[in-house]
Structure formats: structure tokens, C-alpha cells
Image (cartoon, rainbow, N blue to C red):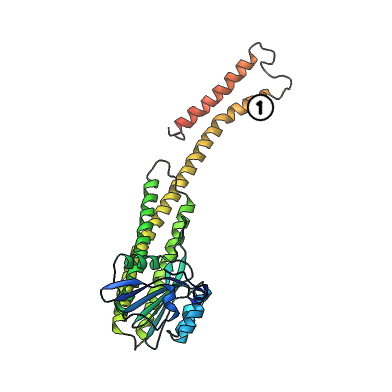
Amino acid sequence: MAPKDIRDVALCPGLIWGFDFAPGEASPVDELDLLHPDARPPGFRWLHFNLSDLRTERWLRAASLLPGDIVDMFLSVDQAQQCVYDQGVLGLVLHDLELEFHDSDPNVGSFRVALASSFIITGRNHPVRSAETIKRRMEAGVSVPDADAALDLIFTSMADVFRRTNADLEAAVQVVEDELLKDHPSTDARTFLNMRSLMVRMHRLYSGTRAMLGLLEDETALPTTFLKAADRFAGRLSNLDAELLASQSQLRLLRDELDLQATQQTNQNLYFLSVLTALLMPATLVTGIFGMNTGGLIWLSAKYGSLYATGLAIASSLLVYLVLRLSGFIRR
């Protein structure tokens, strides 16, 4: 392969990956192929861009593939979910989970889509999980012959990502439940707070996406196949949201159980300290009296005075113990 001219690279957009789907085959798109966007083989094309790359903005505005309002939506810093249909092109801003390269709870990012009859352009500012899922499926042999298949693949991939997130949350709840069944659970309030925070974000994502998909019904010119794909996706989101709310309810019960166990442990500790204080109080009184060093103290001159005082302290504690035991205050 000939080396790339630095001037050509500077004119290329920030392409992450792309595929041309000709009948019976799929071939990757090189960024140099985008120097002439009109010169491409017949078939459906999928381009996925890095929107943080300034070359992408320049290429999108110069290529004139998309209507102006969809280009503005595509390049906007606004993270809110929205939909636009103009001149036969469907523009979407969908919430997705960002792909983190370290162990942490995922943040919610934006996955932007511009879908026309012969091509689809997607982009993101931060790596998102659905885009990676789509790429893996394409590399595994999934074909995208038209716009209907592209939209369905996006919705299916996003639903799969959300389903795995729900499964991870449910598994984490089960781990917490198993921990609470132990004699000394290690689960703390921070674990519940992190799980609760992710569940709230996912619930807002599901609700917001369903509300945005409902707006597509107002687009009378939108193809029926797009509406059907959106309805199927909204149904999947409703089921995922129901599963999430079930896990959230179970987590709330587990939190109540954890609070109950903590209260019981605190009460047990207070009970032990109360009994210990009651047992030591007579002995403390005896040692305090004999430590006053005042005249007239008994056993002051006795040979075994210290032994007598110690015995009196022990006897007084034993007497208190018997009184508490007979009154039922000491249960074991």
C-alpha cells in the first residue's frame, strides 16, 4: 500500500470505521475514500465518526450529504435526546452508555445518527458501547443492505447493551443478598449508593428514549418501516425498564434489611455495654471508697486489708449479676 500523503490525511474526516455493503459482500472504507464522497461503489454505506475531531465537522459541512439542520444537530454539544426528519434524512440523538477503559460505573453519553436511503452516518464524542457492538457484529458477518436494516441494527445493539447492564445490576443485587445472609456481611452503604445511582440513570435513559421515540409518530413523512422499528425498540425498553424497577425494589428491601441488621448490631452492643457498666459499677464504688485516704477506713491497718477490699468488690459485682439474672435483664 502506498504511503498516505499528509495533505490528504489532513483533508480526511475523523473516521473511526466504515463499511460498504455491496450485494453479497461487505468491505471496509478507508478514510482516503472519503476525499470524494460521491465516488463510491453501489450499495449501502455506513460511516462512524469521531465528533471530537475537528476534521469531521469540516468534512460534514463540505460533503453536503446531510441537510443543514441535521448537520447542526450532529455537531451540537447539546446532549439531550432529539429527532429530526428533513429531506428524507432521519437525524437522531440517542443516549447510550459510554465505554470506559477502567473498572467504573458507566456514564451516559450521546450516540448521533443520520440515516438516509443509501447511507448512514453515526458519530460520538466519547466511545459508546452500542457503536462497539455494531462494529463487532459487522465484522462477524452481519450485513446491512439498506436503511431499515441499519436502524434495526442500531436499536437491537442498544437493547443488547442495556440488557447486559440490567443483567449486571441484577447479578450485583444477588451478590448483596448473599452477603446479607452471612453472619458478618461485608456490604456497606457505599455499595448500595453506587448501585442506586446507576439504576436511576438507567431508568431516566429508558424513560427519555421512549419519550423521544414517541415524537417520531408526529413525523407524517417518516417511512412506516422506521416507525415499526421504533415501536419495537420502545417495547424492548419498556420490558427492560420493568426489569430494572424490579431489581430496584429488591435493592430497596435489601437496604432495609441491612439497616435492620445494623440496628440490631447496635442494640446488641449497647446491651453488652449496659450489662458491663452495671457489673463494674459496684466494684468501682468500692475501689473509690478505699481510695479516698481518709481517716477511719476499715481494714486500713489490717494485714490482709487489700485482699478484703478486693473480695468485697468482686462480691458486690456478683451480687449485681445475680440480681440482673433473676430479674431477666441478662438473657444469656
The answer to which of 252 and 204 lies nearer the viewer is: 204
Can you see residue 190? yes
Note whether 5 is above or below 181 in the view shown: below
Where residue 75 appears, x then y in whole percent?
49, 78
For mark 1, does the 10 Å Cα neighbourhood hold few (<14), some (14 to 19), or many (20 or more) residues? few
| Corner quadrant of residue 113 | bottom left
Residue at 57% from the left image edge and 29% from the top image edge: 280
Where residue 201 appears, x then y in whole percent?
44, 65
Check the picture and name the quadrant holding the C terminus: top left
The answer to which of 37 and 180 lies nearer the viewer is: 37
Residue lying at the far front in this picture: please name it.
2
Where residue 252 appears, x then y in whole percent?
41, 57
| Corner quadrant of residue 155 | bottom left
Dot 1: element: helix
Note whether 267 is above or below 105 in the view shown: above
Residue lying at the far left in this picture: please name it.
24
Residue at 32% from the left image edge and 73% from the top image edge: 233
Residue at 36% from the left image edge and 63% from the top image edge: 244
Task: Report the residue marked by disc 1.
Answer: 288
